[in-house]
Image (cartoon, rainbow, N blue to C red):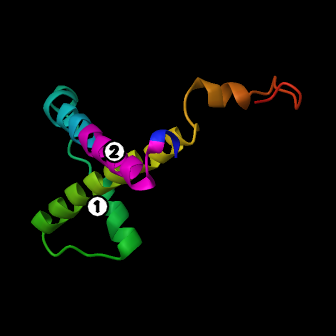
Amino acid sequence: MRNGSTALTVLGRGAVAGVAGTVAMTAFQKFVEMPITGRPDSYAPADFAEKVFRLTPGTSAARWRLNNATHLALGTMWGGAYAFAARAGLRGRGLWRRSSSRSTPATCC
């Protein structure tokens, strides 16, 4: 890891960023986008958890809790994954420039 950062520090920062991003995006959807468009709540995270973990919530309240927990967990994990990718240099324009079809072995990287 660069700059003396440990894997745990990078993961922690990424997880915090993932939580913050998930909360911000969810708040925008709930309080701005959904009232404007009239779109109902999505239960895609709950659908995912039910299929992957073979869960069957007994009540609609339990499904709502599963949905929110899965939504936040996925955002947190994606934050951690992004942090590791960014630390490894796998983000930004440089990555796409290096993988461009115009690159040749002599000019690549």
In the picture, measured across the screen, residue 74 lies left or right of residue 104, that is left
Image quadrant where one finds the C terminus: top right
Residue at position x 28%, y 59% from top?
70
For the residue pair 73 and 34, the one nearer the viewer reads as 73
Mark 2 and mark 1: Cα distance apart in space: 26 Å
User: Up-down: is 30 above or below 79?
Assistant: above
Element assignment for label 2: helix
For the residue pair 67 and 101, the one nearer the viewer reads as 101
Q: Is residue 43 visible?
A: no
Residue at position x 89%, y 27% from top?
106
Q: Residue furthest front?
A: 4
- Which mark lies nearer to you, 2 or 1? 2
Place of residue 45 in the rendered image (x, y in percent of width and height, measured from the top left): 31, 56
Q: Which residues are magenta?
A: 4-21
For the residue pair 90 and 51, the one nearer the viewer reads as 90
Residue at position x 63%, y 26% from top?
94
Identify the mark nearer the N-term, 2 or 1.
Answer: 2
For the residue pair 12 and 3, the one nearer the viewer reads as 3
Predominant SS of the magenta segment: helix
Q: Which numbered marker is on residue 71?
A: none
Looking at the rendered structure, the kind of residue marked 1 is Ala
Q: Is residue 36 visible?
A: yes
Element assignment for label 1: helix
Q: Which numbered marker is on residue 46?
A: 1
Q: Are marks 2 and 1 in contact (CB under 8 Å)?
A: no
In the picture, measured across the screen, residue 53 lies left or right of residue 93, that is left
Q: Which residue is mark 2?
A: 13
Place of residue 49 in the rendered image (x, y in percent of width and height, measured from the top left): 33, 66
Q: Is residue 52 magenta?
A: no
Residue at position x 69%, y 24% from top?
97
The answer to which image quadrant residue 102 occupies is top right
